[in-house]
Image: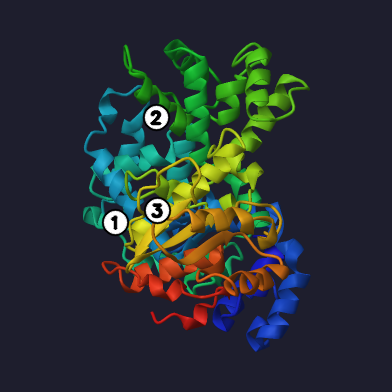
Amino acid sequence: MNYQNCISLSMNLNELKRIASAYVEDSRRLDISELKTSLLKTEGQYTSFENIEKQLDKLKLHDNPVVRIITPILLQEYLLDEDEFTSSCKATEEAVLKYEQSIIDESNNFDYKSMSKDFSLLKYVFDVAWEHENDISVDEKNLIEKIRKYLNITVREQNMLEAKAGRFPTKGNVLHTRSDIDIARRTLQSAGILFYIKSSDGIPCDIIPEEIAQSLRKYYDIEIRNYGYKQLIQYVTKVTKKQYFIDILEKYNNSPNTATVDVPQNPTVPYLQEIVLKTIKPSNLIGGFSPRDGLDCEVLSNWCANLGLSVSGAKSALVSRILEYYDKLHKIEISSEDIREKYYKVYHELAKRDLTYLRENGLISKDLDCEHYFEKATDYLFEVLLKNKPLLLTGTEHPDGKLSFNDKYILWDNKSKETPVNLQDHISQFDRYIKSSDKAVSVFMVIAPSFTENSVKECVKYTLTNDTLILLITADELKDVAELWHRHHPEESFNLGFFKQNGRFEKSKLLI
């Protein structure tokens, strides 16, 4: 979401005042309308890389150690890796705590004495700084930061070194509290970096406007998000051998101003993939560290062709094209082994045949997959969320789904289209399904992205001579019903009688 949209959607006066305090004069005296106007006028100051860089440099040396520690975790490790750079406030807090716990867990196996880097010097400085105080002062933090960079030690390695000494994220390896995270959140808002909006469901969310996010990525040297990078690494694994990863890590170690990576003898491919993900920039992995490194132009060109991208241009252009493609991939997380859940997550995109989005995210390989996966997602919706298992379909000509309703059936058909569905174009097909059913059909549901105005008249016309109702329901409406029901009645079956409507679906008739 861009900066202007973030401002227009912000409705919390206190949050807006806090954000405005970064660059808007007399922000405390302004009402919400005046604040928004002022924030829109000062957009350039909020999105300026130079201003953002200064703010982040200040936060590194903030008086409050809570802010110093949590800021890079919240921004670099989490929000900049999220779709649309957005997360519910609760999920943000959980992610920060999860990261801190992961550092503590990894530190148990962090044998810094056997590694090639000079961790002993940094540890000595830490020990001196902690000798008389529980917290490190701003001056000590500044010195440690300079020594860390001089020794080519990563921030994550520094955190593990601190955790091993029982000092990360706080003394005794005690995790920060949600109140601590909120202090960091408010500080980032006051710096004009982090914004606050509410989702359509009224859930409070942390968001970084995309213009600010791009500057933050530049500051933290982030090329693409982790999800996309993992998919990219998988493709490189298919077109290369294990030695390619070993060679690229060796070239990385020989590059100036880079932290040395210790690679064990005969490492496994998954181990190499993990090291590459954490240490090698995507552009270096596929483009190399010199014109002769990396994948050759033929491999890159074929890769672009497979992704439906232009295959022309120099090697650098091919690399940029590939990185841009993988950076746009969206995370689709599923909570079960049911593959249908993956398709349900993109129900809206399948319904409206957003082929570009579906291809970019590796969800379809051919156009026909769109219709097929739309059907599978609807199966999942009825079976898992509404607790009504679809019946087995037989024969060669049948609707996309069938449900048992008392002594009758409810049938449905999915219509994945880029334009509104006109029922008249399909009513003869649906009539055949209804007439060939071995039981009476109470309702025939048509699930589509949208419908023409004339479609409602066609429903009325059909029911004048038939006992079956024709219900026109959009994919978004059906998904809203399913999620609302599942949220309030997770273990109960949805009463399919609510679908006994003729014409366009009316949500107001539900009793949930």
Kind of residue at badge 2: Glu
- Tag 3 or tag 2, which sits nearer the N-term? 2
- Residue type at tag 1: Thr
Front residue of 292 and 117: 292
Q: Secondary structure at mark 2?
A: helix
Q: Nearer the viewer's eye, disc 2 or disc 3?
A: 3
Instruction: Report the disc number at residue 170.
Output: 1
Q: Is residue 166 left or right of residue 180?
A: left
Q: Residue 342: x, y in percent? A: 44, 47
Q: Secondary structure at mark 3?
A: helix
Circle 3 Cα neighbour tier, 10 Å, few/some/many (<14 / 14–19 / ≥20): many
Please tell me whether residue 64 is drawn above or below residue 364 in the rendered image.
Answer: below
Amino acid type of disc 3? Tyr
Residue 252 in the image, given as x and y percentages of width and height: 51, 20
Tell me the CA gap for discs 2 and 1. Answer: 27 Å
Q: Are marks 3 and 1 in contact (CB under 8 Å)?
A: no
Q: Is residue 252 visible?
A: yes
Residue 484 % position (x, y): 41, 71
Answer whether residue 137 is visible to the viewer in this image. Answer: no
Residue 448 falls in image quadrant: bottom right
Which residue is rendered at x = 35% and y = 57% of the image? 383
Q: Is residue 135 left or right of residue 306?
A: left
- Residue denoted by label 3: 380
**What residue is pinned by disc 2?**
274
The answer for how far apart the CA atoms under marks 3 and 1 are is 45 Å
Q: Is residue 336 left or right of residue 202?
A: left
